[in-house]
Amino acid sequence: MNAAFKAGISHGSFKLPWRSLLLVAGALVAYLALGAAPGDWVFDREAIARGEWWRLITGHWVHSDPAHAFWDISALLLLGALFEACLKWRLPMVLLLTSLGVDAWLWWGDPALNYYCGLSGILNGLLIVGLLHLWRDNRHPVILLTALAAILKIYVEINTGQSLVTQTAWPSVPVAHAAGYLSGLVIATVTLISGHSHYKLNVIPRQ
């Protein structure tokens, strides 16, 4: 079992993933208050080009219809519950950095794409970051199989041009899932390498 997860269970109590719960609450409030695909918040290429930069972040937190919101927010809750114990404050930071990675692909990788919304792209980044942090401390084969299954899912989605989980009001953008996964892979690699180097510096015996 992951050491950070063990630390979250002390004296018979489980630490609530409060950061994830706040993010889930924010996504829920955004959908309930703003409705489906609010025009001022989605990724809109022309609006961003005019200087509406906030859409690069908010576009990931609004959804095109109730099913889209349900699946994405449920996945955020699940991943938060699984990984917050090991990621802690890094969890929202991973989502932010992965947002920028997905945005970079949306902007330069598919210039014909004018509109986008939803959490699914950045959640793929959170998934691989969380899995690799768990793998560092516990080389259980299920962790590796889950990472490989996510790659297979993305591959099938790209080839079929649609999400395997649900159909939404807006066309699915499966390559955004790949962009999120690859962004998360880069983030995890950098953080794990830097964390390993820091650990080695701390354990060098003093002369």
Image: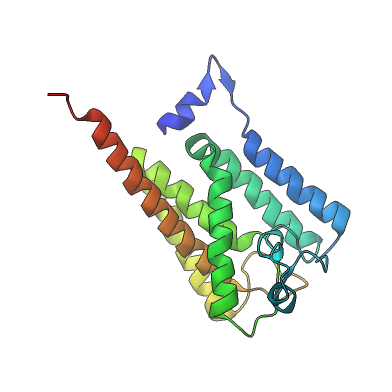
**Residue 25 appears in which quarter of the rendering?**
top right
Q: Quadrant of the N terminus?
A: top left
Drawn side of residue 140 relative to residue 77, left or right = left
Compared with 186, 202 (above or below) is: above
Residue 80 percent location from the top left of the image: 59, 43
Kindly tell me whether residue 204 is visible in this rendering: yes
Kindly tell me whether residue 1 is visible in this rendering: no
Drawn side of residue 149 relative to residue 24, left or right = left
Residue 52 percent location from the top left of the image: 73, 68
The residue sitting at 35% across, 38% down in the picture is 137
Compared with 101, 2 (above or below) is: above
The residue sitting at 66% across, 64% down in the picture is 56
- Give 33 or 150, whichever is nearer the viewer: 33
Residue 70 percent location from the top left of the image: 74, 55
Q: Quadrant of the C terminus?
A: top left
The residue sitting at 65% across, 81% down in the picture is 113
Drawn side of residue 146 relative to residue 40, left or right = left
Residue at the top extreme? 11
- Give 72 or 26, whichever is nearer the viewer: 26
Residue 189 percent location from the top left of the image: 37, 53
The residue sitting at 17% across, 25% down in the picture is 205
- Give 87 or 56, whichever is nearer the viewer: 56
